Amino acid sequence: MAAGVTLLAGGAGLGLAGRAAVAADAPSTANVTVKAVYLPPVVEVARGGKVIWTFDDGNTPHTVTADDNSFGSPANGQKSGTYEHVFDQSGSVSYHCDFHLGMIGTVNVR
Ligand SMILES: [Cu+2]
């Protein structure tokens, strides 16, 4: 396996002349804050990467529920703490909150 898989967030530090040809420039971890909306609503991770959602909306519970039900936080909602999921397949996965219509997000897996 090629060395050089880094944990760079965002694009910082790219452009090195000798950078290994890793499969993706996408970060291996992405963070989403769950308030009245998902912030940011669209994130990108490399295949095998992880998204961490942090619930931070006071007494209002939310869920992180894949539209195709391939992943999901507890169905009764979560008010604090985190939920995380590792994405092993490339593609785009949309998700939503079971409690709030229009509260939607997308994970793009490279
Ligand atoms: Cu919600």
Image: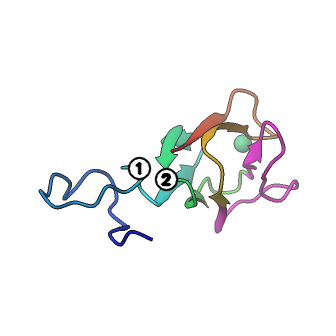
Task: Tell whether position 79 is magenta.
Answer: yes
Q: Secondary structure at mark 2?
A: loop
- Image coordinates for residue 51, horizontal then vertical, percent: 57, 57
Tell me the quarter of the picture where residue 55 sits: bottom right
Mark sitting on residue 24: 1
Give the residue type at disc 2: Ala
Q: Which residues are magenta?
A: 61-85
Look at the picture and state if 85 lies above or below 24: below
Which residue is nearer to you in this view: 90 or 106? 90
- Rendering quadrant holding ligand 1: top right
Which residue is nearer to you in this view: 11 or 42? 11
Left or right: 99 in relation to 14? right
Look at the picture and state if 52 lies above or below 64: below
- Image coordinates for residue 13, horizontal then vertical, percent: 19, 59
Which residue is nearer to you in this view: 17 or 9? 17
**Mark found first going from the N terminus, 1 or 2:** 1
Q: At 51% from the left edge and 37% from the top edge, which residue is drawn?
A: 42
Q: How is the image coloured?
A: rainbow
Q: At 71% from the left edge and 39% from the top edge, which residue is drawn?
A: 95
Q: Are marks 1 and 2 in contact (CB under 8 Å)?
A: yes
| Residue 110 in view (yes/no) | yes
| Residue 37 in view (yes/no) | no
Name, please, the residue furthest toward the left: 17
